[in-house]
Image (cartoon, rainbow, N blue to C red):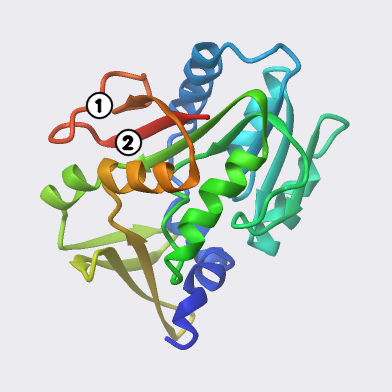
Amino acid sequence: MENTSQWFASWFDTPYYHILYKDRDNSEAQLFMDTLTNYLNLPEDGEILDLACGKGRHAIYLNSLGYRVTGADLSENSIEHAKQFENETLNFQVHDMCKPFKKQFDAVFNLFTSFGYFENEADNLRTIKAIQADLNETGFGVIDFMNCDFVIENLVPEETKTVEGIEFHLKRYVQDGYIIKDIQFEDAGENYQFQERVRAFTLDDFQELFDQAGVYLLDIFGDYKLNKFNKNTSERLIMIFK
């Protein structure tokens, strides 16, 4: 596949990305938002930035809870889709998360493993610094990442998923510090191949980035109910910082 340095821009921009992941559990996502906003004790009409918001499912729900929400994503197609849900307290815009937003928020959420896709290592640190710049004095940053130790230990090397009549052939492996998923399928007589590459960041790796950015890690959780993080058994790595 050409132009691998920006693979995430092209794969996330295809309708196939959304078909493959369409069964993502909304009730779990909403429960997570309820639990998280309660835990952070955000002001009632607080301002939240949902960074790498995709088609806006978290942002729309957060807005329904009464927060003023901005959803930002690199994918123009996703933002175009999300814009139909805009209102006075919910807006979406195309934005590169390596760059500060030029506005400050009560919370910046980076949810559902939307970090670590950059080809350029420096962009990871830039993103942490940008999130910090986007927080007001009492604001919290939240990164919801996968727990790479657990994921690598439980990696399913090959799998076929049929969604909307399309057979997606998935291969997963670890290479050069990345967790890689090769995605291959055929639709309307055309063959397609995409690749997802996510940096296999551990808690220690994040701690190093936070130290470099001068960011203070407050809390670490291991699942969407905000249970304690355990590197061997937790599925998620949810970090709250300021």
- Residue 1 appears left or right of 49: left
Q: Quick one: 95 or 128, which is closer to the camera?
A: 128
- Circles 2 and 1 in contact, beta carbons < 8 Å: yes
Label 1's element?
loop
Residue 142: x, y in percent? Answer: 49, 33
Q: Amino acid at mark 1?
A: Phe
Mark 2, Cα crowd under 10 Å, few <14 / some 14-19 / many 20+, is many
The residue located at (25%, 36%) in the rendering is 235
Q: Is residue 37 above or below residue 92?
A: above
- Residue 88 appears left or right of 165: right
Q: Amino acid at mark 2?
A: Leu
Residue 134 is tagged as none
Q: Quick one: 63 or 218, which is closer to the camera?
A: 218
Dividing the image into 4 quarters, which one contains the N terminus? Answer: bottom left
Residue 236: x, y in percent? Answer: 31, 36
Residue 237 is tagged as 2
Tell me if residue 146 can be seen.
Answer: yes
Q: Is residue 239 above or below residue 18?
A: above
Mark 1, Cα crowd under 10 Å, few <14 / some 14-19 / many 20+, is some
Quadrant of the image occupied by residue 63: top right
> Seen from this angle, which residue lies furthest bottom?
2
Label 2's element?
strand
Residue 196: x, y in percent? Answer: 38, 66
The residue located at (16%, 52%) in the rendering is 152
The residue located at (46%, 38%) in the rendering is 143
**Mark 2–mark 1 distance (CA, rounded to whole Å):** 7 Å
Label 2 or label 1, whichever comes before in sequence order: 1
Q: Is residue 160 above or below residue 218?
A: below
The residue located at (70%, 31%) in the rendering is 105
Quadrant of the image occupied by residue 210: top left
Tell me if residue 53 can be seen.
Answer: no
Which residue in the structure is indicated by mark 1? 229
